Amino acid sequence: MNARALEHLFDDLGRSLDWLGEALRVGAEEPLAIDGTIQRFEFTFELFWKSGRRLLAHQGIEANSPRTVLQQAFRVGWLDDEQSWLKLLDDRNLTSHTCREALPQEIYSRVPAHHAATREGSRSYARCRNRSAQVARTPGDRNHAATKPFAGRAVARFAV
């Protein structure tokens, strides 16, 4: 994946985090609000693990499933509390079974914590991207393509 495509992936992740936060501000009184929030949680998680997969690949680590990506991201220190991340993955997997009456409400009640964790994980990814960009720089050449692989709004949005 080239730098531009990776930047677009992170821009999409940032937008999806913003949209999930927006959905969480809507009251849970309406079933459609719960369904919409769960849908936004699903696509945010998809972008999150796929972004992690790309970053791991950049580090020479192969991880092709969401579980493996989370485990490897934890192993390299990008994510804290592996079990919480695996619980987030379990909730994502349960969302396809939301025909059971109580399950959507149960998952919805955990989405705020998942949103906060995913936003923090995205910040960690951004720090990794920034370190990778620093390593890739060519000394003295500010316009070299390697100096800009992760530049853009996504880094600023995730800055700590």
Image (cartoon, grey):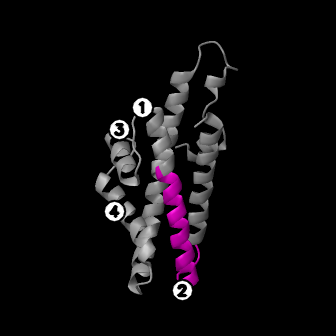
The answer to whether 159 is drawn above or below residue 102 in the figure is: above
Residue at label 3? 76
Assign a secondary structure to mark 3. loop
User: Which of pointers 4 and 1 lies earlier in the amino acid sequence?
Assistant: 1
Q: Nearer the viewer, residue 8 or 111?
A: 8
Do the numbered discs 4 and 3 sit on residues whose CB atoms are within 8 Å? Answer: no
Q: Is residue 100 visible?
A: yes
Residue at label 2? 29
User: Which of pointers 4 and 2 lies earlier in the amino acid sequence?
Assistant: 2
Q: CA distance from mark 2 to mark 1?
A: 46 Å
Q: Main secondary structure of the magenta part?
A: helix
Q: Amino acid at mark 3?
A: Val
Q: Residue at x 33, y 58 (%)?
A: 86
Do the numbered discs 4 and 2 sit on residues whose CB atoms are within 8 Å? Answer: no
Residue at label 4? 87
Q: Could you tell me residue 77's position as x and y percent? A: 35, 40
- Choose mark 3 or mark 2, whichever is in front: 3
Q: Amino acid at mark 2?
A: Glu
